[in-house]
Structure formats: structure tokens, C-alpha cells
Image: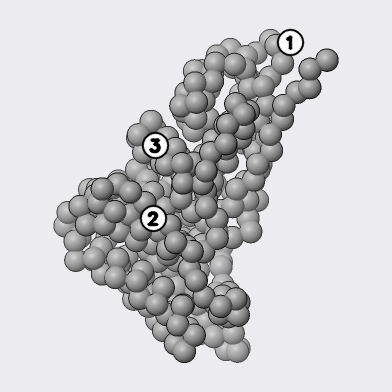
Amino acid sequence: MKSQKNDNYSHSASHLIFRRGTDYPVWYREYGGAVLSTTIDKCCYLTCRYLPPFFEYHSRISYSKVENVGANSAIEHPSVRSCLQLLEFNEGVEIHHVADLPARTGLGTSSAFTVGLLLGLYALKNQMRDKHSLALDAIHVEQDLLQEAVGAQDQVSAAYGGFNRISFHADDTIEVKGVLTAKNRLTELQQHLALYFTGFSRTASEIAREQIKATPQKKKELGIMFQMANEAEAIITSPNRSLDEFGRLLHESWKVKKTLTQNITNTSIDDIYEAGLSAGALGGKLLGLEAAALCCSLYRPNDERH
């Protein structure tokens, strides 16, 4: 009896520190871009296998809902349908997805899903895909096949993992370099950071489309954000510089980000952010464009106010 191939994969969510905006093709294909990004220990888990031909349906897809379909083209989940299309899967498959985080947190969970699914499907075909190729495949699925208003850093961060500087070049090439600094420096940074759930979220696509549309009028702001990524990396990799500088730079970058579109923030988010500053935070940001599920702040660990 032939054994059934069953591939299980997990991929980490990403946390963008500095700075979304320059990872959109409309910007970096003309001016170049860069972000400072890290992944965290919250994952999505995917199981992929060929579905035996004994069921009344062709494929079964299980996520927040269950789809039993007669053809892969009938799958409603856009990323699953497009990934199967990209890899020319005509066979019946069974895909299960569970996650440590809900959708629309601003942590790149959609791209982590796409990257993990592609890796699992390649494995079903007995093919290996390196990190960079996997990231480019995920970008192609989300930007070209699905026509989503997304940047390119979430896919790269999910494929590579770790703490990286991701550079986007005008010729469409993407360069990933690990942030090189002492382990105790990274521990110190982690001790200064706090991540909060705001209690609400919304889909980012409309905000992203507004930001992309406004890009030609925001050259100065996006140029500043690009330089902030360079400065942030310099602070982290210089052991003699205080991480207070990093916190203050985070605050300045948030002030710039708020000017990109009028819907980046709202009164409730502003109140939460100001409460964080009053409690001792030196700076902070919303994660993603969700307006917003999670808020990150940098504070002094010995400040009792936080």
C-alpha cells in the first residue's frame, strides 16, 4: 500500500520596526527602499497532502471555514486558489491551517500563510525552494495574481525569518542582510520593547491603496522614512549608542507615517499612543496598516510607570 505524503510547515509572523512605505513597488522602482524587520515566535501552521480519490469532493481546504470543492478553480480562499494555480496543481489536495494569531493584526499573517503554503505545496511536488525564491513567489502571488495593495517586505520577512535589513532596488532586485550585532545588544533591545493588542482591527487594503495613490505627493516623507531605516540600523549595531535614541527615532517615524494618509490613525489610536508616552514610552508605532490591532512601544525597563 502506497504511503500518503503529508507535509507540515510553520511560518513566523513579522514585526516591521522601520518602516513601511518604501517597500511598495510604486516607490522603490524609482527611488529604492529599505525596511528594518524582525519575526517573532508566533506562527501559522499548515498541513498539505494529496487528497485520496475516495471522497465526494476534489479538494478540502480548512481555515476559519471549511471548503469542499469539486475543482481547485472553485476554491474561494484567494491565496490558496492562486498558489495552486501558480504551481499548476490539478490534483485534489487537503490543506489545513491554524495560527497563533488572528487575522488583521498588522503582523504580516497573510504573507506568512502564503509563504508557508507555497513551501508545503513545493514539497508535495518533491521540489525544494530557497528562501529568496520563495519570497519572490509569494510577492508574485499577492501583487500580480491577486492584485492586492501590498508591499514586498512581509513576504521576504516570512520567508527568511530573523532580524533583517531588507533593501528594495529600482531594478526590482531585493537584498536581505541580517542585522549584525552582539547577542546581548539584541537582548537589551527586546527588554526595551513592548507589544500591545489594541482590541480592534480592520482590513488594511483601503488604507494601502490610499497610501499608494498618494505616493507621488509624499516623496519628502518617504525619503525621510528611508533614511530612518539606515539610522535605526546604525543605532542597534553601535554598542556605544543608547537605545533611547532608537525610541526617539521610533517616535519621529510615527509622526511622519501619520502624514501619509488621513486614515493611518484615528482618535482612539492617538489616545492609546499618548497613554503609552505618558507611561514612559520613548516612542511607538502601529504594526501594519490595520489602524490597528497591535501597537509597539519602546521604553526604559527600569521605568516603573510602564
Q: Tell me where residue 169 appears, x and y as whole percent.
A: 29, 53
Q: Gap between marks 3 and 2, in whole Å?
A: 17 Å
Circle 2 crowding by C-alpha within 10 Å: few under 14, some 14–19, many from 20: some
On screen, residue 303 above or below 183: below
Q: Nearer the viewer, mark 2 or mark 1?
A: 2
- What residue did someone put label 3 on? 140
The residue at 57%/36% (across/down) is: 128
Q: Gap between marks 2 and 1, in whole Å?
A: 46 Å
Front residue (pair 156, 280): 156
Identify residue type, mark 3: His
State which tag comes first along the sequence, 3 or 1. Answer: 1
On screen, residue 66 above or below 285: above
User: Is any atom of residue 210 visible in this view?
Assistant: no
The residue at 60%/26% (across/down) is: 125
- What residue did someone put label 2 on? 175
Q: Is residue 27 left or right of residue 228?
A: left
- What residue did someone put label 1 on? 54
Are discs 3 and 2 less than 8 Å apart at CB?
Answer: no
Secondary structure state at the residue bearing disc 3: helix
Picture disc at residue 9: none
Are discs 3 and 1 less than 8 Å apart at CB?
Answer: no
| Number of numbered tags placed on the structure image | 3
Q: Quadrant of residue 50?
A: top right
Secondary structure state at the residue bearing disc 2: strand
User: Is any atom of residue 160 visible in this view?
Assistant: yes
Q: Is residue 258 left or right of residue 296?
A: left
Identify residue type, mark 1: Phe
